[in-house]
Image (spheres, rainbow, N blue to C red):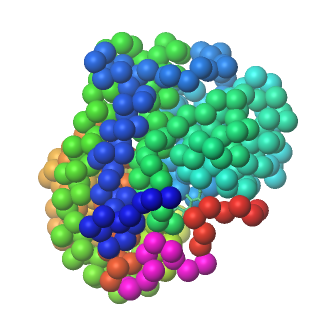
Amino acid sequence: LLVDKGNHRHFMAKEIYEQPETISHTLSHYVDMGAEKVAIRETLPFDFADLSRLTMSACGTAYYAGAIAKYWFERYARLPVDIDVASEFRYREPPLEKGGLSLFISQSGETADTLAALRYCTGQGQHVASLVNTLESTIARESGVVFPILCGPEIGVASTKALTAQLTALASLAIAAGRARGVVSAEQETELVRAMTALPSAVSAALAAEAQIMDISKRLSKAKDVLYLGRGAMFPVAMEGALKLKEISYIHAEGYAAGELKHGPIALVDEAMPVIVVAPSDELVDKTLSNMQEVAARGGNIILITDPEGARTVGHGVADIIEIPRVHSFVAPILATIPVQLLAYHTAVFMGTDVDQPRNLAKSVTVE
Ligand code: AGP
Protein backbone atom coordinates (compact mmCIF):
# COMPACT_ATOMS: atom_id res chain seq x y z
CA LEU A 1 0.00 0.00 0.00
CA LEU A 2 1.63 3.20 -1.13
CA VAL A 3 0.29 5.98 1.03
CA ASP A 4 2.45 8.64 2.61
CA LYS A 5 1.85 11.52 4.97
CA GLY A 6 2.74 14.18 2.44
CA ASN A 7 3.73 17.30 4.35
CA HIS A 8 1.83 16.26 7.44
CA ARG A 9 3.24 15.06 10.73
CA HIS A 10 0.69 12.29 11.08
CA PHE A 11 -1.66 10.34 8.82
CA MET A 12 -4.51 11.64 10.93
CA ALA A 13 -3.62 15.25 10.04
CA LYS A 14 -3.33 14.36 6.37
CA GLU A 15 -6.68 12.61 6.49
CA ILE A 16 -8.35 15.54 8.26
CA TYR A 17 -7.00 17.94 5.63
CA GLU A 18 -8.02 15.71 2.73
CA GLN A 19 -11.68 16.01 3.57
CA PRO A 20 -12.65 18.75 1.09
CA GLU A 21 -11.44 16.43 -1.68
CA THR A 22 -12.74 13.17 -0.23
CA ILE A 23 -16.20 14.64 0.33
CA SER A 24 -16.21 15.92 -3.28
CA HIS A 25 -15.24 12.47 -4.44
CA THR A 26 -18.05 10.78 -2.51
CA LEU A 27 -20.49 13.42 -3.76
CA SER A 28 -19.52 12.83 -7.36
CA HIS A 29 -20.58 9.19 -6.93
CA TYR A 30 -23.94 9.92 -5.31
CA VAL A 31 -24.98 13.18 -6.92
CA ASP A 32 -25.70 14.18 -10.50
CA MET A 33 -24.05 17.59 -10.30
CA GLY A 34 -25.58 18.90 -13.53
CA ALA A 35 -29.15 17.97 -12.60
CA GLU A 36 -28.59 18.78 -8.89
CA LYS A 37 -30.25 15.50 -7.96
CA VAL A 38 -29.17 12.45 -6.02
CA ALA A 39 -28.35 9.59 -8.38
CA ILE A 40 -27.92 6.16 -6.76
CA ARG A 41 -25.92 4.00 -9.16
CA GLU A 42 -26.21 0.77 -7.22
CA THR A 43 -29.07 -1.55 -8.16
CA LEU A 44 -31.39 -1.69 -5.17
CA PRO A 45 -32.99 -5.06 -4.44
CA PHE A 46 -35.66 -3.19 -2.40
CA ASP A 47 -37.79 -0.10 -2.82
CA PHE A 48 -37.49 2.62 -0.14
CA ALA A 49 -41.20 3.30 -0.65
CA ASP A 50 -42.12 -0.18 0.60
CA LEU A 51 -40.08 -0.15 3.79
CA SER A 52 -41.66 0.26 7.18
CA ARG A 53 -38.35 0.42 9.03
CA LEU A 54 -34.61 0.73 8.52
CA THR A 55 -32.34 -1.17 10.90
CA MET A 56 -28.76 0.05 11.26
CA SER A 57 -25.78 -1.37 13.14
CA ALA A 58 -22.16 -0.32 13.36
CA CYS A 59 -19.37 0.22 15.88
CA GLY A 60 -17.55 3.29 17.18
CA THR A 61 -17.38 6.20 14.79
CA ALA A 62 -19.33 4.31 12.12
CA TYR A 63 -22.11 3.93 14.70
CA TYR A 64 -22.15 7.70 15.21
CA ALA A 65 -22.46 8.14 11.44
CA GLY A 66 -25.58 5.99 11.60
CA ALA A 67 -26.85 7.85 14.67
CA ILE A 68 -26.64 11.13 12.73
CA ALA A 69 -28.27 9.54 9.67
CA LYS A 70 -31.19 8.41 11.81
CA TYR A 71 -32.20 12.07 12.11
CA TRP A 72 -32.06 12.41 8.31
CA PHE A 73 -34.01 9.26 7.43
CA GLU A 74 -36.69 10.03 9.97
CA ARG A 75 -37.02 13.71 9.12
CA TYR A 76 -36.49 13.74 5.36
CA ALA A 77 -37.86 10.29 4.45
CA ARG A 78 -40.27 9.68 7.35
CA LEU A 79 -38.66 6.25 7.61
CA PRO A 80 -38.42 4.93 11.19
CA VAL A 81 -34.86 3.91 12.07
CA ASP A 82 -33.61 1.47 14.68
CA ILE A 83 -29.95 1.81 15.39
CA ASP A 84 -27.73 -0.12 17.73
CA VAL A 85 -24.07 -0.62 18.38
CA ALA A 86 -23.33 -3.85 16.51
CA SER A 87 -21.73 -5.31 19.65
CA GLU A 88 -25.15 -5.30 21.36
CA PHE A 89 -27.57 -5.68 18.47
CA ARG A 90 -27.85 -9.47 18.40
CA TYR A 91 -28.19 -9.86 22.12
CA ARG A 92 -31.67 -8.39 22.20
CA GLU A 93 -32.65 -10.77 19.39
CA PRO A 94 -34.58 -8.07 17.56
CA PRO A 95 -37.55 -9.37 15.60
CA LEU A 96 -37.14 -8.20 12.00
CA GLU A 97 -39.74 -8.21 9.31
CA LYS A 98 -38.89 -10.34 6.29
CA GLY A 99 -38.00 -8.15 3.32
CA GLY A 100 -37.03 -5.24 5.56
CA LEU A 101 -33.76 -3.39 5.15
CA SER A 102 -30.70 -3.65 7.37
CA LEU A 103 -27.78 -1.32 6.77
CA PHE A 104 -24.29 -1.86 8.15
CA ILE A 105 -21.65 0.84 8.25
CA SER A 106 -17.98 -0.12 8.41
CA GLN A 107 -14.89 1.61 7.09
CA SER A 108 -12.83 -1.59 7.11
CA GLY A 109 -15.64 -3.98 6.31
CA GLU A 110 -14.02 -6.44 8.74
CA THR A 111 -15.36 -5.45 12.16
CA ALA A 112 -16.35 -8.72 13.84
CA ASP A 113 -19.42 -7.45 15.68
CA THR A 114 -20.76 -5.66 12.61
CA LEU A 115 -20.27 -8.80 10.55
CA ALA A 116 -22.06 -10.90 13.18
CA ALA A 117 -24.98 -8.44 13.19
CA LEU A 118 -25.09 -8.65 9.40
CA ARG A 119 -25.25 -12.44 9.50
CA TYR A 120 -28.05 -12.30 12.05
CA CYS A 121 -30.05 -10.03 9.69
CA THR A 122 -29.36 -12.26 6.70
CA GLY A 123 -30.73 -15.12 8.77
CA GLN A 124 -33.87 -13.08 9.47
CA GLY A 125 -34.56 -12.67 5.74
CA GLN A 126 -33.60 -9.00 5.62
CA HIS A 127 -32.22 -7.16 2.63
CA VAL A 128 -28.65 -6.50 3.66
CA ALA A 129 -26.91 -3.33 2.54
CA SER A 130 -23.53 -2.06 3.63
CA LEU A 131 -21.64 1.19 3.49
CA VAL A 132 -17.94 0.40 3.33
CA ASN A 133 -14.62 1.88 2.32
CA THR A 134 -12.89 -1.43 1.62
CA LEU A 135 -14.81 -3.00 -1.22
CA GLU A 136 -12.96 -6.31 -1.11
CA SER A 137 -13.96 -6.88 2.54
CA THR A 138 -16.02 -9.63 4.17
CA ILE A 139 -18.90 -7.29 4.99
CA ALA A 140 -19.02 -6.09 1.37
CA ARG A 141 -18.93 -9.67 0.08
CA GLU A 142 -21.81 -10.75 2.30
CA SER A 143 -24.05 -7.79 1.44
CA GLY A 144 -26.83 -7.73 -1.14
CA VAL A 145 -25.94 -4.17 -2.03
CA VAL A 146 -22.73 -2.28 -1.29
CA PHE A 147 -22.55 1.50 -1.08
CA PRO A 148 -18.94 2.64 -1.40
CA ILE A 149 -17.74 5.65 0.58
CA LEU A 150 -14.71 6.21 -1.67
CA CYS A 151 -12.47 8.19 0.69
CA GLY A 152 -9.26 6.28 -0.08
CA PRO A 153 -7.27 4.30 2.48
CA GLU A 154 -7.60 5.58 6.04
CA ILE A 155 -4.43 4.81 7.99
CA GLY A 156 -4.87 6.72 11.27
CA VAL A 157 -6.61 4.55 13.85
CA ALA A 158 -8.85 7.50 14.67
CA SER A 159 -11.42 7.67 11.92
CA THR A 160 -11.86 11.10 10.31
CA LYS A 161 -12.30 11.23 6.55
CA ALA A 162 -14.19 7.92 6.59
CA LEU A 163 -16.79 9.52 8.88
CA THR A 164 -17.45 12.51 6.62
CA ALA A 165 -17.56 10.18 3.59
CA GLN A 166 -20.02 7.87 5.37
CA LEU A 167 -22.17 10.87 6.25
CA THR A 168 -22.08 12.22 2.69
CA ALA A 169 -23.24 8.85 1.34
CA LEU A 170 -25.88 8.46 4.06
CA ALA A 171 -27.24 11.97 3.42
CA SER A 172 -27.59 11.05 -0.26
CA LEU A 173 -29.39 7.81 0.60
CA ALA A 174 -31.74 9.69 2.92
CA ILE A 175 -32.65 12.07 0.10
CA ALA A 176 -33.15 9.13 -2.28
CA ALA A 177 -35.41 7.50 0.32
CA GLY A 178 -37.29 10.76 0.86
CA ARG A 179 -37.90 11.10 -2.87
CA ALA A 180 -39.02 7.47 -3.24
CA ARG A 181 -41.40 7.88 -0.31
CA GLY A 182 -42.88 11.09 -1.66
CA VAL A 183 -41.60 13.18 1.23
CA VAL A 184 -38.89 15.19 -0.54
CA SER A 185 -40.18 17.26 -3.46
CA ALA A 186 -38.10 18.02 -6.56
CA GLU A 187 -37.40 21.57 -5.30
CA GLN A 188 -36.48 20.36 -1.85
CA GLU A 189 -34.15 17.79 -3.35
CA THR A 190 -32.34 20.54 -5.27
CA GLU A 191 -32.08 22.58 -2.08
CA LEU A 192 -30.63 19.64 -0.13
CA VAL A 193 -28.24 18.69 -2.93
CA ARG A 194 -27.00 22.28 -3.08
CA ALA A 195 -26.43 22.12 0.67
CA MET A 196 -24.28 19.03 0.12
CA THR A 197 -22.30 20.46 -2.76
CA ALA A 198 -21.48 23.51 -0.60
CA LEU A 199 -19.72 21.21 1.89
CA PRO A 200 -16.19 20.93 0.44
CA SER A 201 -15.57 24.67 0.56
CA ALA A 202 -17.28 24.96 3.96
CA VAL A 203 -14.98 22.21 5.27
CA SER A 204 -11.94 24.09 3.94
CA ALA A 205 -13.13 27.20 5.77
CA ALA A 206 -13.70 25.20 8.99
CA LEU A 207 -10.14 23.83 8.74
CA ALA A 208 -8.85 27.40 8.75
CA ALA A 209 -9.68 27.65 12.48
CA GLU A 210 -6.66 25.45 13.18
CA ALA A 211 -4.47 28.11 14.89
CA GLN A 212 -7.23 28.99 17.35
CA ILE A 213 -8.00 25.31 17.91
CA MET A 214 -4.33 24.68 18.73
CA ASP A 215 -4.51 27.36 21.37
CA ILE A 216 -7.64 25.82 22.93
CA SER A 217 -6.15 22.32 22.66
CA LYS A 218 -3.16 23.40 24.71
CA ARG A 219 -5.55 24.12 27.57
CA LEU A 220 -7.63 20.98 26.91
CA SER A 221 -4.49 18.88 27.24
CA LYS A 222 -4.37 19.88 30.94
CA ALA A 223 -7.91 18.68 31.63
CA LYS A 224 -8.72 15.38 33.29
CA ASP A 225 -12.26 15.19 32.01
CA VAL A 226 -14.08 16.90 29.16
CA LEU A 227 -17.81 17.01 28.53
CA TYR A 228 -19.23 17.39 25.00
CA LEU A 229 -22.84 18.49 24.59
CA GLY A 230 -25.11 18.54 21.56
CA ARG A 231 -28.82 18.48 20.78
CA GLY A 232 -30.60 16.82 17.85
CA ALA A 233 -28.16 15.58 15.21
CA MET A 234 -25.39 17.40 17.13
CA PHE A 235 -25.76 14.87 19.95
CA PRO A 236 -23.98 12.10 18.02
CA VAL A 237 -21.40 14.71 16.94
CA ALA A 238 -20.78 15.36 20.66
CA MET A 239 -20.32 11.63 21.27
CA GLU A 240 -17.96 11.40 18.33
CA GLY A 241 -15.94 14.34 19.68
CA ALA A 242 -15.61 12.60 23.03
CA LEU A 243 -14.62 9.29 21.43
CA LYS A 244 -11.96 10.96 19.32
CA LEU A 245 -10.48 12.77 22.33
CA LYS A 246 -10.42 9.59 24.44
CA GLU A 247 -8.84 7.50 21.72
CA ILE A 248 -5.84 9.63 20.96
CA SER A 249 -5.25 11.92 23.96
CA TYR A 250 -6.31 9.42 26.67
CA ILE A 251 -8.26 12.20 28.37
CA HIS A 252 -11.57 11.03 29.74
CA ALA A 253 -14.44 12.56 27.81
CA GLU A 254 -18.16 12.04 27.54
CA GLY A 255 -20.67 13.09 24.93
CA TYR A 256 -24.09 13.90 26.28
CA ALA A 257 -27.41 15.10 24.94
CA ALA A 258 -27.52 18.74 26.05
CA GLY A 259 -30.98 18.29 27.57
CA GLU A 260 -29.73 15.43 29.77
CA LEU A 261 -27.21 17.68 31.48
CA LYS A 262 -29.45 18.47 34.42
CA HIS A 263 -30.35 14.80 34.84
CA GLY A 264 -26.92 14.00 36.17
CA PRO A 265 -23.73 15.20 34.55
CA ILE A 266 -24.18 18.80 35.67
CA ALA A 267 -22.97 17.57 39.07
CA LEU A 268 -19.53 17.18 37.51
CA VAL A 269 -19.26 20.74 36.25
CA ASP A 270 -16.61 22.92 37.87
CA GLU A 271 -13.81 25.27 36.76
CA ALA A 272 -11.59 22.32 35.92
CA MET A 273 -13.85 20.60 33.42
CA PRO A 274 -14.05 22.10 29.93
CA VAL A 275 -17.49 21.77 28.34
CA ILE A 276 -17.52 21.68 24.55
CA VAL A 277 -20.90 22.68 23.18
CA VAL A 278 -21.62 21.77 19.54
CA ALA A 279 -24.42 24.13 18.55
CA PRO A 280 -24.60 25.68 15.10
CA SER A 281 -27.61 27.98 14.68
CA ASP A 282 -30.80 26.00 14.09
CA GLU A 283 -34.23 25.75 15.63
CA LEU A 284 -32.74 24.07 18.73
CA VAL A 285 -29.96 26.50 19.51
CA ASP A 286 -31.96 28.60 22.00
CA LYS A 287 -32.61 25.52 24.11
CA THR A 288 -28.91 24.75 24.16
CA LEU A 289 -28.27 28.33 25.26
CA SER A 290 -30.06 27.62 28.52
CA ASN A 291 -27.84 24.54 29.07
CA MET A 292 -24.80 26.76 28.51
CA GLN A 293 -26.08 29.19 31.10
CA GLU A 294 -26.43 26.31 33.57
CA VAL A 295 -22.79 25.40 32.92
CA ALA A 296 -21.57 29.01 33.17
CA ALA A 297 -23.44 29.52 36.46
CA ARG A 298 -21.33 26.71 37.95
CA GLY A 299 -18.06 28.18 36.80
CA GLY A 300 -17.72 25.77 33.85
CA ASN A 301 -15.52 26.77 30.93
CA ILE A 302 -17.42 26.61 27.68
CA ILE A 303 -15.92 26.08 24.27
CA LEU A 304 -18.68 26.75 21.77
CA ILE A 305 -18.63 25.37 18.24
CA THR A 306 -21.10 27.36 16.19
CA ASP A 307 -21.54 29.52 13.08
CA PRO A 308 -21.48 33.36 12.92
CA GLU A 309 -25.25 33.52 13.45
CA GLY A 310 -25.01 31.25 16.50
CA ALA A 311 -22.10 33.29 17.85
CA ARG A 312 -24.29 36.40 17.66
CA THR A 313 -27.35 34.85 19.26
CA VAL A 314 -25.93 32.52 21.91
CA GLY A 315 -22.25 33.38 22.13
CA HIS A 316 -22.47 36.25 24.66
CA GLY A 317 -19.90 35.90 27.39
CA VAL A 318 -18.39 32.72 25.91
CA ALA A 319 -14.63 33.14 25.83
CA ASP A 320 -13.88 30.45 23.26
CA ILE A 321 -16.00 30.29 20.14
CA ILE A 322 -14.83 28.10 17.28
CA GLU A 323 -16.60 29.31 14.18
CA ILE A 324 -17.67 27.13 11.32
CA PRO A 325 -19.40 28.58 8.25
CA ARG A 326 -23.17 28.79 8.23
CA VAL A 327 -24.58 25.93 6.16
CA HIS A 328 -28.00 24.32 5.69
CA SER A 329 -29.01 22.55 8.92
CA PHE A 330 -29.22 19.29 6.93
CA VAL A 331 -25.44 19.15 6.45
CA ALA A 332 -24.42 21.03 9.61
CA PRO A 333 -23.59 17.82 11.52
CA ILE A 334 -21.09 16.85 8.80
CA LEU A 335 -19.33 20.20 9.06
CA ALA A 336 -19.39 20.18 12.86
CA THR A 337 -17.26 17.02 12.95
CA ILE A 338 -14.29 19.02 11.60
CA PRO A 339 -13.52 21.13 14.70
CA VAL A 340 -13.98 18.14 17.02
CA GLN A 341 -11.43 16.20 14.95
CA LEU A 342 -8.96 19.08 15.10
CA LEU A 343 -9.46 19.55 18.84
CA ALA A 344 -8.71 15.87 19.50
CA TYR A 345 -5.77 15.87 17.13
CA HIS A 346 -4.01 18.92 18.56
CA THR A 347 -4.71 17.92 22.15
CA ALA A 348 -3.06 14.56 21.46
CA VAL A 349 -0.10 16.28 19.79
CA PHE A 350 0.37 18.44 22.91
CA MET A 351 0.18 15.33 25.07
CA GLY A 352 2.83 13.68 22.93
CA THR A 353 0.86 10.49 22.34
CA ASP A 354 1.21 8.18 19.36
CA VAL A 355 -1.55 9.84 17.38
CA ASP A 356 -1.77 7.41 14.47
CA GLN A 357 -1.45 4.30 16.59
CA PRO A 358 -2.88 5.02 20.02
CA ARG A 359 -2.21 2.50 22.77
CA ASN A 360 -4.48 -0.54 23.09
CA LEU A 361 -6.33 0.17 19.84
CA ALA A 362 -6.42 -1.55 16.46
CA LYS A 363 -7.60 0.02 13.23
CA SER A 364 -10.04 -2.76 12.67
CA VAL A 365 -11.45 -4.86 15.48
CA THR A 366 -11.76 -8.39 14.17
CA VAL A 367 -12.59 -10.08 17.47
CA GLU A 368 -15.88 -9.82 19.37
C1 AGP B 1 -12.85 5.48 15.36
O1 AGP B 1 -12.03 6.56 15.56
C2 AGP B 1 -12.40 4.19 15.92
N1 AGP B 1 -11.06 3.86 15.77
C3 AGP B 1 -13.41 3.04 15.90
O2 AGP B 1 -14.45 3.44 16.75
C4 AGP B 1 -13.99 2.58 14.55
O3 AGP B 1 -14.79 3.58 14.00
C5 AGP B 1 -14.77 1.29 14.78
O4 AGP B 1 -13.90 0.29 15.25
C6 AGP B 1 -15.48 0.80 13.55
O5 AGP B 1 -14.60 0.39 12.54
P1 AGP B 1 -15.11 0.06 11.10
O6 AGP B 1 -15.73 1.29 10.55
O7 AGP B 1 -13.89 -0.35 10.33
O8 AGP B 1 -16.12 -1.05 11.22
Q: Residue at x 50, y 22 (%)?
A: 41
Image location of residue 240, percent across then percent down: 47, 59
Q: Within the displayed image, which quadrant is ligand 1 positioned in?
A: bottom right
Camera-side residue: 367 or 263? 367
Q: In the visual, does 174 lie left or right of 190?
A: right
Q: Quadrant of residue 202?
A: top left
From what the image shows, is residue 230 above or below residue 102? below
Q: Residue at x 82, y 28 (%)?
A: 125
The answer to whether residue 358 is magenta is yes
Q: Residue at x 42, y 30 (%)?
A: 29
Residue 55 in view, yes or no: no
From what the image shows, is residue 117 above or below residue 351? above
The answer to whether residue 234 is magenta is no
Stretch in magenta = 351-360
Give the number of marks.
0
Q: Quadrant of residue 56?
A: top right
User: Which SS does the magenta portion mostly show?
Assistant: loop
Q: In the visual, does 307 lie left or right of 342?
A: left
